[in-house]
Each structure stands twice: as C-alpha cells, then as structure tokens.
Image: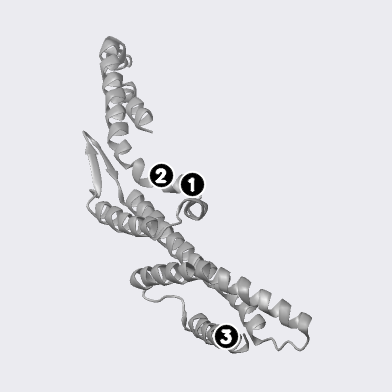
Amino acid sequence: KYYREMKKFIQIPEKFGGLNNPELFKSLIDRNSQSFVSVYQKADSLFQRLGRALTHFKDSVVLGSIDVEALVESTITDVADWEYNFKEVKAKGRQAEKLPSVIRVDCVTVSTTPVKAAIDDQLQRLFEALLIALRKAVAKHIAEIDEFLDRGLEALSARPETVEEIGKTNAMHAEISKEKPTIKPLFQAAETKNRLLRSVAGSGVDLSPVNARWEKFELLLEFQCIRNVEIY
C-alpha cells in the first residue's frame, strides 16, 4: 500500500494540463526518474527499520505459536517449576504494560495495541494452563492415596475365620505396612502443591476427606498391630 500511494504521488504531474503543451508536466516524471531511485531506496530503508522495531515483540508473542496446555503438561512437574512460571507470568505482564502504545519510524506510526492485547491473552492462557495442571497434579496424588486406602481399609476391615483366611489377611497387612512409607510423601506433595494453588488461585482442593480416611486407616492399622501382639 505504501508503494502504491507513493506511485500515485509521483504520477500526479500526469494529471496536470499544460497551457499549450499537454505533455509539459508529464515530462517532469521522465526528467526526474533518477531521483525516484533514491526515493525507493529510502522506502526500503524505512521498512527495514520498521522490521527491526517490530522484532522487539517477536519473543513476547511466541506462546501464540505453540500448544501451551501440552507444553505445561509435559514439562512442569515440581512445585519449584510452577512457582517459577507463575512469577514469570506476572513479570511478563508487568513488562507488557510498559510497552509503548505506538511505534514511530519517520512518517510511519504503528499501533502496538493489538500486539499488547495478544500478549495479555497468551499470558492469561499460560496462567490458566498452569492452574489446571497444578490442580490435576494435586488430584492425581489424592487418587493414588485413595487407591492405597481402598486396599488398606478393605484388608484391615476383614474378619478372617479360617486359618487360611487368617494367613492371607496377615500377608496383606504386612504388605500394606511395607507400602505405607511410600504413600506418606504423596500427602506432603499434595499439601505443598495445594498451598501454592490456594495462594495463586484463592482456593484449592479439599483434602479433608482423604485426611479423614488416612486417620481411620492408621487407627485400624495400629489396632491390628496391637491385636497381633496380644495373639502372639
């Protein structure tokens, strides 16, 4: 469009009518044709400078070219990862607010409002993807704990009657007691991630049901250990 408008401007003399010679003003274009080379060179230089000015925004909109949700799911695993990325989202948001509303290069003025809006949208998408992944991580820990508690409570609630049943039950109790230390870290991981979730989202996952089940499990396990000691 710039070159089209520039061509129209150069061709203005063609529309002038001479007093006795209609070709008088048209010849101005031919006589100054060498000067037009410089005009087009300056136009090329202008667009090169515009391109360099706009590359400043290139890194800021890179999230628009990738699947943010898939990236978060595949790369974010530790609490430290979430904490770092939440801080980065806030920092990038503050940087975006400081970006100029317009960029001026010679006679060209470019509004950066659409770019700033795109940056805000992409950062919001990343923030929401981080929240969803964090909530899923907490839910996954709870599911693993619940699966263990289902087996544990079932085994501890069993009332064996035969010698064979007693043997199987004791074996299950031993297996559960051996597996228990591996479950405790899941509680710690869930609670740590849930604290972060509450701090950034205002609310977290309700851990009270699984905590209540765990307390019941420990009571039954302790009772079973006492009963085994009394029997033997």
Q: Percent x, y for residue 225? A: 56, 83
Please tell me which of labels 1 and 3 falls first in the chain: 1
Q: Relative to residue 95, is residue 138 depicted above or below?
A: below
Asked if marks 2 and 1 touch (Cβ < 8 Å), the reply is yes
User: SS for tag 3?
Assistant: helix
Q: CA distance from mark 1 to mark 3?
A: 61 Å
Give the label on residue 66, or none: 1
Q: Residues within 10 Å of mark 2 (few under 14, many from 20)?
A: few
Instruction: Check disc 3 and report the residue beneath it.
Output: 229
Neighbours of disc 1 within 10 Å: few (<14), some (14-19), many (20+): few
Mark 3: amino acid: Val
Q: Is residue 40 visible?
A: yes
Front residue (pair 97, 2): 97
- Of 67 and 96, the residue lying toward us: 67
Q: Earlier in the sequence, mark 3 or mark 2?
A: 2
Colouring style: one colour
Residue 20, can we see it?
A: no
Q: Residue 125 sits in which quadrant?
A: bottom left
What's under tag 1, amino acid-wise?
Answer: Ile
Disc 2 marks which residue? 62
Q: Residue at x 50, y 69 (%)?
A: 181
Answer left or right for 57 relative to 226: left
Whole-percent x and y of residue 85?
Answer: 36, 55
How far across and how far down the image is residue 71, in percent?
49, 50
For residue 62, above or below residue 216:
above
